[in-house]
Amino acid sequence: DQTLRWSLGIIFLLFAAWILVPDKEGEIQNLSKHGVFLTTLISFFLAEMGDKTQLATVALGANYSSIWYVTIGSTVGMMGSNALAIFLGDALLKKIPMKFVRMGASFLFLIFGLGIIFGD
């Protein structure tokens, strides 16, 4: 459907522009540890709703009788994946200034957005 294609492509292009806007100086540092936890918790909860990972977990829960093993397995799997991303991101920021990370991420969103809109 063309409407979905254009909508998704435009969202990616908006992300490409938005990610170039730097955070306000001190904005992140002023959050308490409790505030960082709640911000991360809510952000990930909302971002993962309906995500392919969540849908895969639903399918696994429907196929296997042990809901606890599916719950523990999916939770540990997501924690491992997220921990890897966090540690790699931290290591990357120690080597590359945030300005360049933002530019690279913006470029990727731009390429994906244009690919979605103009691709086959």
Image (cartoon, rainbow, N blue to C red):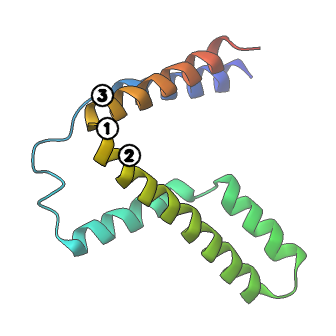
Judge from the rendering whether residue 83 lies leftward or rightward of residue 2; answer left or right: left
Residue at image coords 64%, 53%: 51
The residue at the far top in this view is: 118
Residue that mark 2 sits on: 92
The amino acid on which the numbered mark 3 sits, given as a three-letter code, is Leu
**Residue placed most toward the observer, 2 or 64:** 64
Contact (CB < 8 A) between labels 2 and 1?
yes
Judge from the rendering whether residue 61 lies leftward or rightward of residue 109; answer left or right: right
Q: Residues within 10 Å of mark 1 (few under 14, many from 20)?
A: few
In the image, residue 109 sits, relative to residue 50, either above or below, namely above
Which of the two discs, 2 and 3, labels the residue nearer the N terminus?
3
How far apart marks 1 and 3 lie (CA) works out to 15 Å
Tell me residue 6's x, y (percent): 60, 19
The amino acid on which the numbered mark 2 sits, given as a three-letter code, is Leu
Tell me residue 105's x, y (percent): 43, 32
Say the numbered circle drawn on residue 96: 1
Q: Residues within 10 Å of mark 3 (few under 14, many from 20)?
A: some
Residue that mark 3 sits on: 20
At numbered mark 2, what does the secondary structure look like: helix, strand or loop?
A: helix
Residue at image coords 70%, 18%: 2
Q: Residues within 10 Å of mark 2 (few under 14, many from 20)?
A: few
At numbered mark 3, what does the secondary structure look like: helix, strand or loop?
A: loop
